[in-house]
Structures are given as C-alpha cells and as structure tokens.
Image (cartoon, rainbow, N blue to C red):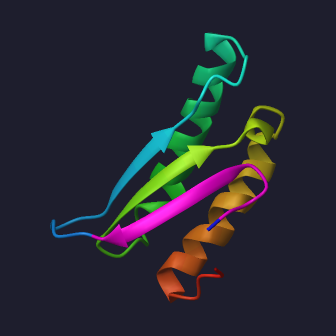
Amino acid sequence: MRTASMDVRAIASLGACARVGIIVPKYGHSSVDRNKVKRRLRELVRIHVLPVLPTIDVVLRAAPKAYTRSFDELREEVRKWSQQLVTGRVAR
C-alpha cells in the first residue's frame, strides 16, 4: 500500500503479536531531520496502530515527502492505512 509520504507492506505473522518496522532513508537530509521523522512515525504507530492491529508484520518505509509533512498530516496517513489493514480492504 502506498500513501503520499510512505510505503506500507504487511504480511501475516507467525508470532503472537503484531510487529512494525520503520525505515527512514536519508534522502539527502541531516540525521536530525531523519530522527525527527523516525520519532514521529514511531509515536504514531505506538498510539494509533499497535492497539488495533491484528497479528501481522508491517514494514513502514518513509518517502521523501515525509520530511516535509506535519505531525497531523502524518497522523491522517497512518490512520488511513491502519484502518485498511484492520478491515482488510487494501487497495492494490
């Protein structure tokens, strides 16, 4: 699944709980900017995704636009794809 500022891949998990991995490439930005994006995504996943996610493994890869998005814009994107994963309606 793809949003404006991230790519999301999910697969069924053999474990007992959901897991989420976050990848934030540099894209020519400083480590301060990169860590800011990582912290934002980690917090959004912790609050909005993990409590509702079924037992699946998710890899979240930030796109270059993630560096320019506000926290609220990232939150809306995370909510949209997490709802799609929970309901099973994934656009391909």
Apparent side of residue 42 relative to residue 67 in the rendered image (left or right): left
Q: Residue at x 80, y 40 (%)?
A: 65
Apparent side of residue 69 relative to residue 45 in the rendered image (left or right): right
Q: Indicate the position of residue 38 as horizontal and vertical percent values.
A: 56, 32
Q: Indicate the position of residue 74 as horizontal and vertical percent values.
A: 72, 50
Q: Main secondary structure of the magenta part?
A: strand
Apparent side of residue 78 relative to residue 10 in the rendered image (left or right): right
Q: Which residues are magenta?
A: 2-12
Q: How many marks?
A: 0
Q: Is residue 51 magenta?
A: no
State which quadrant residue 39 falls in. Answer: top right
Front-lying residue, 35 or 1? 1
Q: Residue at x 66, y 51 (%)?
A: 6
Q: Is residue 6 magenta?
A: yes
State which quadrant residue 69 falls in. Answer: top right
Q: Residue at x 29, y 73 (%)?
A: 55
Front-lying residue, 37 or 23? 23
Apparent side of residue 79 relative to residue 76 in the rendered image (left or right): left
Q: Is residue 82 above or below residue 73?
A: below
Q: Residue at x 73, y 17 (%)?
A: 28
Give the quadrant of the N terminus: bottom right
Front-lying residue, 19 or 46? 19
Q: Indicate the position of residue 84 as horizontal and vertical percent values.
A: 59, 79
Q: Is residue 86 above or below residue 52?
A: below
Give the quadrant of the C terminus: bottom right
Q: Indicate the position of residue 73 as horizontal and vertical percent values.
A: 80, 51
Q: Is residue 55 above or below residue 37?
A: below
State which quadrant residue 83 falls in. Answer: bottom right
